[in-house]
Image (spheres, rainbow, N blue to C red):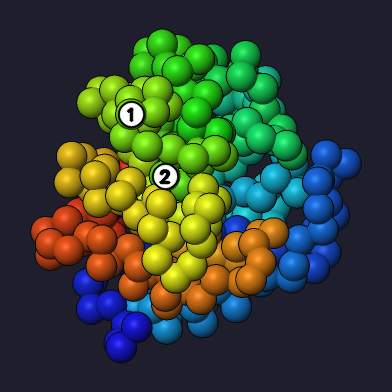
Amino acid sequence: MSAPLTLEGACDCHVHVYEDGYPLAASATFTPPLAPASAYGEVQRALGLSRVIVVQPTGYGFDNRCTLAAIAQLGDGARGIAVVQPDASDQELQRLHEAGIRGVRFMMLPGGALPWDALADMSARIAPLGWNINLQLDGHTLPQHEAMLSRLPSKLVIDHLGKFLAPVTPQSDGFASLCRLLDGPRCWIKLSAPYESSRNGPPAYGDVAWLVRDLSARYPERGLWASNWPHPNVRPLPDDAHMLDWALQLLDADDARRKVLVDNPAELYHF
């Protein structure tokens, strides 16, 4: 990357923060690296980003204190995604909203805290706040849940190109399901973390690069970019500047870049 971005308001839509002093939940599946908000701030400045979405890590379960502290430390350009109990009070949701939370994370892979049967009710509760359901799953399972997801009253954000855990092609049922959801009025997709699905690997991630090209061309107003810093459990550790460059090269039009990096996150996360 020759120079930091010069797009005012560019947003990184998915990072995790891990700080000393916050105990891991019993459901944690790994011990995360120390990744404080101060370290992410250095990455943010180096990449030329001014906004960020701090996503509650699976390792902290329902304890959002670290995420909330990170939002406060990162300032006015930070928002967050929490994990909340299904029976959380309206007052608790309002408290989180005032602290910068703009969605609830549903992780449907090992370590996730919330089950499928809590998703629809949670969507109904958070819709009046303008929040989104932040969903991570194996994209190949989308057809099993598409009908329910298409009816959600809240916004829906799907992580990491769909995170297809087996090879995916334009003819795959899971990809068709993803596109149908994006055809609807309330779904967004993170054009991020290609290493979660790629078998070819860096630097080109050639077997999943087509997803960024296709989805950004078909749904320019529904794409988001994210670094997924600090890249939990990914080895070798990706270079953040390279990951941003990789996405920018696939978003080859200035208009698409502005939508994905600035306009879409501003709308979705209320900047």
Residues packed near mark 2 inside 10 Å, few (<14), some (14 to 19) or many (20 plus) = many
Label 1 element class: loop
Quadrant position of the C terminus in the picture: bottom left
Question: Where residue 266 sits in the image (x, y, percent)?
Answer: 28, 52
Indicate the position of residue 102 as horizontal and vertical percent values. Answer: 45, 42
Residue 121 in view of the camera: yes
Along the line of sight, the residue nearer the viewer: 214 or 191: 214
In the picture, measured across the screen, residue 261 lies left or right of residue 111, that is left
**Location of residue 191 in the rendering, given as x and y in whole percent from the top left corner:** 37, 51
Residue with the mark numbered 2: 161
Q: Which residue, given by chain and number where applicable, does mark 1 sit on?
A: 171
Q: Amino acid at mark 2?
A: Leu
Tell which of 103 and 57 is nearer to you.
Answer: 57
Horizontal side of residue 93 vs 261, given as left or right: right
Q: Residue at x 51, y 76 (%)?
A: 239
- Residue 186 appearing in the image: no
Query: Against 243, is 168 above or below?
Result: above
